[in-house]
Every structure is written in structure tokens, then in C-alpha cells.
Amino acid sequence: MRHKKLWLLLFLLLAGIVIGTLVASLSESVPFLRWLAFGQSIGIDTSKPFLLNLGVIRVAFGFEIGVNISQIIFILIAILSYNYFGKKL
């Protein structure tokens, strides 16, 4: 029972992130919805990763998280949906 709720939460959060990204990319070209695509990225830029060269082996480190307004809205909707559907499991 508890595992079902965990999988439901993970599914809803991932769905919220994916749908939020889709809505943000579609709303970039609409002038009055452009604010949904506003966001920031934090971390080590993946286009210029931290490079560790040990002579024999080279290791590149890069990690970046990008969040926009649309994703935040859809993540909140996913959490509210989890509260509603989680009680029915």
C-alpha cells in the first residue's frame, strides 16, 4: 500500500515536470504567456563542465538544474493531485 503511494507521488511529480516543460516551451512564442517560460539554471554548466585531467584518464563533471514558472505551477498541481488521489488508495 505504501509503495503504491510512493509510485503515485513519483509519477505525478515527473508528469508535472514534463508537462510544465512542454507548456513553457510552447508559451515562449506567445507574448502574454511568455512569463510562464521565465526560469533560472543553477549548477555547473554542462556545456563547459569541470574537467579533471589525470594524464591517463580524463573525467568531466557537470550538473545543471533548470526550473521555470510553468514547472513550479505544475509541480504544485501534482502535489495537490497526490493529496486527493493518495487518500483513495
Image: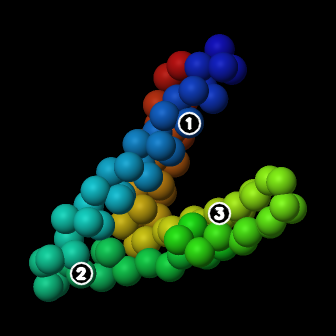
Residue at disc 3, secondary structure: strand
Q: Quadrant of residue 55?
A: bottom right
The kind of residue on which mark 1 rests is Leu
Residue at disc 1, secondary structure: helix
Q: CA distance from mark 1 to mark 2?
A: 28 Å
Residue 47 lies left or right of residue 77; in this view the side is: right
Q: Residues within 10 Å of mark 1 (few under 14, many from 20)?
A: some
The kind of residue on which mark 2 rests is Arg
Asked whether 15 or 79 is in front, the reply is 15
Asked whether 19 or 79 is in front, the reply is 19
Q: Which mark is residue 34?
A: 2
Q: CA distance from mark 2 to mark 3?
A: 26 Å
For image coordinates 71% across by 62% down, the residue present is 61
The kind of residue on which mark 3 rests is Phe
Q: Earlier in the sequence, mark 2 or mark 3?
A: 2
* Outermost residue toward the front in this view: 55
Quadrant, the N terminus: top right
Looking at the image, is 36 positioned above or below residue 56?
below
Name the residue tied to disc 1.
10
For image coordinates 73% across by 69% down, the residue present is 51
Percent of width and height locating residue 6: 63, 29
Q: Quadrant of residue 74?
A: bottom left
Q: Residues within 10 Å of mark 3 (few under 14, many from 20)?
A: few
Q: Earlier in the sequence, mark 1 or mark 3?
A: 1
Name the residue tied to disc 3.
63
* Outermost residue toward the top in this view: 1
Percent of width and height locating residue 52: 80, 66
